[in-house]
Amino acid sequence: MLKSVEESLTKKKNKKKNQSASDESANGVEWTKCNVCLELSNPQYCNCGVHAIIEDANAADAEPNCSFAHAVINMVGMLTGLGQLSASYAVEEGGWACAVIFLIGLAITCAYSCLLLGKCMDKNPKLRSYADIGEEAFGRKGRMVASTLIYTEIFMALVSYTISLHDNLFTVFMGSHYLKHLRLPKLLSPSQLLTVLAVLIAMPSLWLRDLSSISFLSSAGVLMSLIIFSSVVATPIFGGVKVNHRIPVLQIHNVPSASGLFIYSFGGHVVFPDLYKSMKDPSKFTKVIIVSFSIATLLFTTLGFMGAKMFGPQVKSQITLSMPENFIGTKIAVWATVITPMTKYALEFAPLAIQLQHRLPSSMRNRSRMMIRSTVGSVLLLVILALALSVPYFEDVLCLTGSLLTVFISLIFPCAFYTKICWGQMSNTVLAFNSCLIALGLVLGVMGTISSSSSLLSNLQPHH
């Protein structure tokens, strides 16, 4: 009986400790507080690369309730984004043969690498995130490298979103009477001033203490993607644009840059392990991958070839900038493109904010924590703004991100993780296939990085 009383007191003490502490260990897994679900519409599950909070030791075994349809919507939402804006430019740059090979080839290989992440998690039920898999495969160094690339990719993605905001925001107001007569500092152009104002308007979203209040922004981002897609499809029907341009078969010299853009389009593997853990029936994860990547490939193919056929060599790096000015669909698409970056800042910064708050002393007052988090977020956003205005070359930055970061996160690392974790349990055929994919990823990454870096440097020289 004394033993029973002692166990009861211990449980109450632990429960009280769990409510006051910012983190705890359950079943050997570290958990940190996160109430926002990045990019996905279900805020119950943390998909930001940071683990979800648990209130007690039994919460780790809570029943997932993400259905098949919900999982497909979430995965498609992750795959669509900046990639759809650049699809037409990538098709025109590389040629239709290059586009077909990369759209189909990368869809298959990235879907396969996504499946490998699920298999890695099957090997150890305690794994719950991409960084966990990295640590399981290569120890603490594996987690550190994976986390570094994840946060760097987030930073570069925000730079690309800000460049997109800059380009499309000026398109919205370029005919404004007030903008033409606005007196500006010599260092700022009208488009740069508009971008600064837009970022300053979005900045307070980084100061919110309750991160769960921004979870609705993930749904807004998915909605904006659907609006952009619908507007582009409606352009040849109602916008008076003929689909009669000839797409070149293959432009070898542009293949490296096109590959970087296509690779970025099929990224999103950082949150897929979390999505896998949230499913009611994880055995359907393979079907979710097949359906989701098929939908995303169909969307990219439709936008890519339609935009290239409509605008030909004049197609811009963002399809919205090529659409006819007086068409109502263009105005809708451009506004959707403007709103999208403003919904991304708080969402993308959330993982860093959570980790920062987690590392602050537990004795620190909540107001002080909020001040530090807000200051760091604001400074980081201003750095992103300055970089985006200094390097306003959307296609080069996106290609560099895809070639230097996304190719590792979405192709190379999943194959390497699975090979390391399942070494000795896989056939020679699978081992050879994974090795080939790693080599292919390295070749595409090196070629794309060199190409985008060279283009970026050449663009910056006359700029300075």
Image (tube, grey):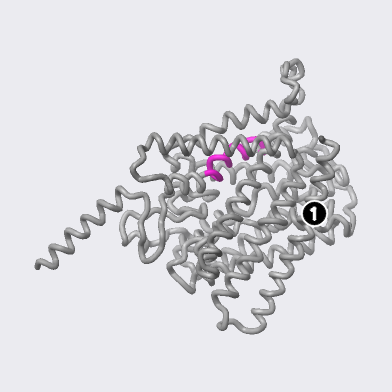
Q: Position of residue 330 (x, y in %)?
A: 73, 35
Q: Is 394 in front, or is 369? A: 369
- Which structural element holds mark 1? helix
Other residues around mark 1 within 10 Å, as few (<14) / some (14–19) / many (≥20)? many
x, y percent for residue 337: 67, 38
Q: Position of residue 422 (x, y in %)?
A: 55, 77
Is residue 62 rendered to the left or right of residue 289?
Answer: left
Give coordinates of residue 269: x percent, y percent: 59, 59
Figure check: 118 above or below 332: below
Specify whether residue 193 is in view. Answer: yes
Mark 1 residue type: Ser
User: Is 452 situated above or below 368?
Assistant: below
Query: On the picture, is 309 further left or further right than 402?
Result: right
What segment carries the magenta color?
A: 337-349
Of 32 and 326, nearer the camera is 32
- Residue at position x 62%, y 50% in the image: 152
- Residue under label 1: 257
The residue nearer to you, when weighing 292 against 399, is 399
The answer to whether residue 72 is seen in the rendering is no
User: Which picture quadrant has residue 449?
Assistant: bottom right
